[in-house]
Image (cartoon, rainbow, N blue to C red):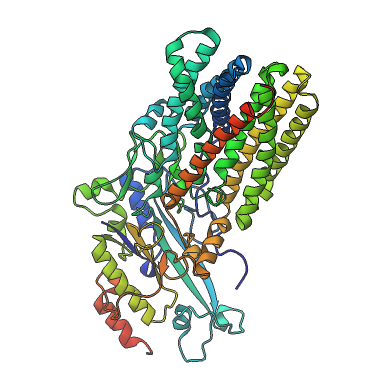
């Protein structure tokens, strides 16, 4: 027996996603929006109005752009409102559409109020709603990827939300560091640096926990993006630590690098899914191994549930007359 | 209602592919010669709802028990006869199977569809409502069999409807009607399961020890299917997953992780804002 995967002419078993570049950008901007809303709300609570206003700007920027990316990726963009026909808990895309809608409305209200002072009473209610809904906004996209048949996404279902959460926090910290004068941006720097470390660490941990399923991250586009992301995040963090509290320009550059690194990290996970779906071995081998180890039953059964093999009139080839002829001419 | 596909009597005529295309007006999808035996259809997708698979298996056989070459080959014996060509007693067998949407009992595509375009019909089948589908494509990577796909230039997702329109008129699906050997059998699933068990027992007793029913049992990862198969080898030989699972099985765990991560994010944000000396 050869050690190669048994496959049907090397054809994939599952389909690659049809999603294009808009989807990882939608993940990135959604995470930016969600974590920025929390940063803004909490900063205002602590009394840092300058950081709060800037973070609401980041949240608004993210939430304004995120749905545009999502809608543009649809096969029939004009039908985007069909996403709100129902609320289906088995579908992260369904639940996410509602989270996005609530976040969009509340974040917009809070940001407009923070910069213009309009709608003060509604904004007072909108702020905590935006902050609260921003949290699942940052993590449901990981649930979306994990809830598929793509092995490298599905097998990482426990860690992927934490990876996306640290990515969201990193994006929010980076955006705030770019837009906020350094003397008011201490909390943003703390957030950016801590999330940078977490983002690097959690991505490594996720790939480690994937074990045999992690191979797609080691080849092609995912492996290149991984290196790029790591370099941008590490470089941005180093610059922020050294010069970020003194120089606005250094802080902005550092923030840019960190944001780029966070976006690259989303792209790495996205591209790894395509690699994982394209090669039948990533689907077949783990399933076959689990069946052989007795951990899974599998979908095939060799033992018939009946003892007598009466020929059934299903096919002309199995009709009684034909079977009788075959049996009489057989050597048995 | 559903399909039982008895691949042991499939002759690879592709009448099912043609009938399906004609009845459902599925667009042309010519891809040229693939070199994959007689299979130039390649896979199920938006423009291919029935796909006939061809596998050529060369099996060296031991013919010392007086059996004919064909008999020995049919037994699927993998004993090394120490010979190098068909003329010198190597065995050879064809595996041919018509693949289709499985119309799973626990259908991942239906579970993840955010618009409700995918729904369960009164016949127990899974159908896409093309006037609702907005082409979000979530069903495409969710299907453990790689059945659904987006139709280019149209933007929506299409798949086998189990001829929903024909069923409503008390007809059987086009592929089942066209199949000349009745490899594709259509009917009530209880009746089809009974036929399948007897056919499996018959084949096993005839020496086909790799014969197996695929997706016939409710205990598998999709709760059994509306389209189940009798295969003559492992599922992966036909390009089918050995252990397909509806991702809904893990959705509780997935939401719990997303929820915990959201809480952790909130805690982290609070720590960053309130945790330092300076604001």
Taking depth in this image into account, of B182 and A112 the one nearest to the observer is A112
Q: Is residue B141 visible?
A: no
Residue at x 64%, y 44% (from the top left corner):
A202
Residue at x 57%, y 56% (from the top left corner):
A282
Quadrant where the image shows the N terminus of chain A: bottom right
Work out whether A265 lies above or below A239. below
Residue at x 55%, y 61% (from the top left corner):
A286
**Residue B96 left/right relative to B186:** right
Quadrant where the image shows the C terminus of chain A: bottom left
x, y (%) of residue A174? 67, 26
**Residue B218 left/right relative to A235:** left
Taking depth in this image into account, of B163 and A12 the one nearest to the observer is A12
**Residue A35 left/right relative to A332:** right
Residue at x 68%, y 29% (from the top left corner):
A190
**Image quadrant where residue A41 sits:** top right
Q: Is residue A145 visible?
A: yes
Residue farthest right in this picture: A242
x, y (%) of residue A195? 66, 35
**Image quadrant where residue A243 sits:** top right
Residue farthest left in this picture: B170
x, y (%) of residue B185? 29, 62
x, y (%) of residue B106? 36, 53
**Residue A301 left/right relative to B173:** right
């Amino acid at each position: 027996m050869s050690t190669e995967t048994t496959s049907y002419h090397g054809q994939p078993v599952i389909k690659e996603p049809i999603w294009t570049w808009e989807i990882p950008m939608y993940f990135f901007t959604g995470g930016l929006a969600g974590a920025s809303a929390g940063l803004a709300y909490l900063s205002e609570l602590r009394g840092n109005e300058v950081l709060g206003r800037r973070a609401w700007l980041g949240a608004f920027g993210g939430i304004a752009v995120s749905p545009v990316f999502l809608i543009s990726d649809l096969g029939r963009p004009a039908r985007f409102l069909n996403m709100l026909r129902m609320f289906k808990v088995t579908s992260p895309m369904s639940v996410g559409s509602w989270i996005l809608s609530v976040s969009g409305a509340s974040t917009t209200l809070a940001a407009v109020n923070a910069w213009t002072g309009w709608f003060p009473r509604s904004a007072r209610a909108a702020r905590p709603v935006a902050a609260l809904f921003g949290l699942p906004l940052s993590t449901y996209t990981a649930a979306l990827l994990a809830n598929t048949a793509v092995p490298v996404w599905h097998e990482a279902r426990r860690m992927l939300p934490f990876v996306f959460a640290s990515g969201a926090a990193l994006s929010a910290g980076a955006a705030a560091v770019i837009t906020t004068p350094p003397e008011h941006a201490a909390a943003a720097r703390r957030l950016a640096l801590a999330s940078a470390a977490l983002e690097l660490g959690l991505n490594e941990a996720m790939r480690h926990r994937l074990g045999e399923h992690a191979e797609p991250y080691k080849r092609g586009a995912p492996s290149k993006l991984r290196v790029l992301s790591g370099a941008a995040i590490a470089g941005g963090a180093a610059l922020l630590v050294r010069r970020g509290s003194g120089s606005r320009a250094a802080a902005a550059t550092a923030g840019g690098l960190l944001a780029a690194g966070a976006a690259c990290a989303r792209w790495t996970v996205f591209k790894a899914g395509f690699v994982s779906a394209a090669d039948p071995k990533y689907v077949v081998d783990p399933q076959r191994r689990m069946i052989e180890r007795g951990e899974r039953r599998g979908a095939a059964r060799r033992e018939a549930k009946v003892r007598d093999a009466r020929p059934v009139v299903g096919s002309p080839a199995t009709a009684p007359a034909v079977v009788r002829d075959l049996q009489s001419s057989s050597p048995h | 209602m559903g399909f039982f596909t008895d691949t042991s009597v499939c002759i690879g005529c592709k009448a099912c592919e043609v009938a399906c295309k004609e009845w459902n007006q599925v667009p042309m999808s010519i891809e040229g010669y693939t070199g994959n035996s007689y299979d130039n259809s390649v896979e199920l997708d938006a423009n291919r709802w029935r796909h006939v698979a061809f596998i050529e298996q060369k099996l060296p056989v031991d013919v010392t028990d007086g059996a004919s070459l064909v008999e020995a080959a049919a037994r699927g014996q993998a004993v090394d006869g120490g010979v190098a060509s068909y003329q010198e007693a190597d065995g050879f067998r064809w595996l041919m199977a018509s693949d289709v949407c499985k119309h799973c009992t626990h259908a991942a595509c239906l579970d993840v569809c955010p618009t409700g375009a995918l729904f369960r019909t009164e016949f127990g089948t899974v159908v896409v409502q093309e006037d609702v589908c907005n082409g979000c494509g979530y069903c495409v990577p969710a299907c453990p069999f790689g059945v659904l796909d987006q139709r280019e230039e149209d933007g929506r997702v299409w798949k086998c409807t189990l001829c929903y329109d024909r069923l409503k008129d008390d007809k059987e699906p086009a592929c089942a009607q066209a199949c000349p050997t009745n490899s594709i059998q259509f009917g009530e699933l209880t009746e089809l399961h009974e036929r399948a068990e007897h056919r499996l027992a018959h084949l096993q007793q005839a020496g086909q020890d790799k014969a197996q029913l695929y997706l016939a049992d409710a205990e598998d990862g999709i709760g059994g299917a509306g389209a189940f198969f009798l295969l003559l080898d492992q599922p992966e030989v036909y390009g089918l997953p050995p252990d397909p699972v509806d991702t809904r099985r893990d959705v509780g765990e997935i939401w719990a992780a997303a929820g915990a991560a959201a809480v952790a994010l909130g805690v982290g944000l609070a720590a960053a804002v309130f945790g330092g000396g300076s604001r």
